[in-house]
Image: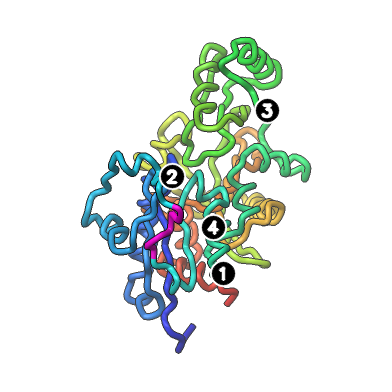
Amino acid sequence: MIGEKKKCIGLIFGGYSNEHEVSISSAKTVFHAFNSEINKKRFTVKVFYIDKYGDWLDCDLSEKILIGKTEIKITKKQENFSKEKINFLDGIEFQNIDVWFPLLHGLYGEDGSIHGLLKYTKKPLVGCGIIGSALGMDKILMKSIFSNLKIPQVNYLAFQDEDLNDKKVKNRIISKILENLNFPVFVKPSNSGSSLGISKVKKKSEIPQALDKAWKIDPRFLVEEGLEVREIECGIIGNSKLLTSEIGEVIYESDWYDYDSKYNLDNKIIIPAEIDSKITKQIKKIAIQSCKALNIFGFARVDFFLEKSSNKILLNEINTIPGFTTKSMFPMLWKASGLNIEQLVAKLVEISLDL
């Protein structure tokens, strides 16, 4: 890219998602990284904020929101989702964008929706495509594919098209959980992130409330068997050739790695994780295998469980748009692997351009 004109990066953040605030925090980190002394010579950045009701704001107002010069205000009119608009991108100047960098965590972003929209602009984007994003976001489909490939996972049950308002249906689900899984169990929405909608259940009486909590977010949900494990994570970047970061471990004070643990509390991060070199090699191999199985490329974070009693590796999930906040594991993993945040965002752009 030396000698070429600056590339204009279109940074998209916010979104109609329960991870709206996390997206804003991630975008702040990436925005500052692109505006560092070294990157300002190579990139310019236009930011596009999508509010909680799906409306796109212009670049000037989006940047003011991102850097904290103005507050986010939601009006009654916006709550109507701009029904009178025919083109929801009307007035948004994005023709001169060279590379898109979507940082929409969760629904309508990480699930491939934004990737499908951006495809129509015929501009490259940072991250993977529609299929990989959709499969990585959907825990049920993801786990089904991993099961077929014999990739080790915790025992789980998947539920779809169930009416939890029907007591008979709910009792049948509870019975199936009790028959097939050992406590504790985790009840999870199939499509969600940042541990939102997830409950750890230790006894039968806690199951109904946990089911309702997950079902409110997604009518498709799963229940996983809880084990005594270590939380292990690996970063991935690349296209046809995927590269793995150092392996990291998160040690948290809470009962499990929930939303507060990820964003509000001080966890102990160990990079590289203190594990056997053979286990490290296996984790990296499975990380690449699992990403290729779902057609995930660009960048991702692959999360594992390492069972404490047996050192057995269990694949948990893949995050196709992992967090870039100051407390997020993905940039920390790559910093420990030799790429600081400024180098990392530049590298991700280069990967999107196949340089």
Give the residue type that dot 2 points to. Answer: Tyr
Asked where in the image residue 35 lies, by quadrant, the reply is: bottom left
Can residue 301 be seen here? The reply is: no
Separation of residues labelled 1 and 2 (CA atoms): 24 Å
Kind of residue at badge 1: Lys
Question: On the image, numbered disc 3 is attached to which residue?
Answer: 157
Residues at marks 1 and 2 touching, judged by CB atoms closer than 8 Å: no
For marks 2 and 4, give the CA distance: 15 Å
Tag 4: residue type?
A: Leu
Q: Distance between the residues labelled 1 and 3?
A: 40 Å
Look at the numbered disc 2 and give the secondary structure of its residue. Answer: loop
Q: Is residue 89 magenta?
A: yes
Q: Tell me, yes or no, whether the highlighted magenta stretch contains residue 212.
A: no
Residue 270 in the figure: left or right of residue 57: right
> Nearer the N terminus, badge 3 or badge 2?
2
Are the residues tagged 1 and 4 within 8 Å (C-beta)? no
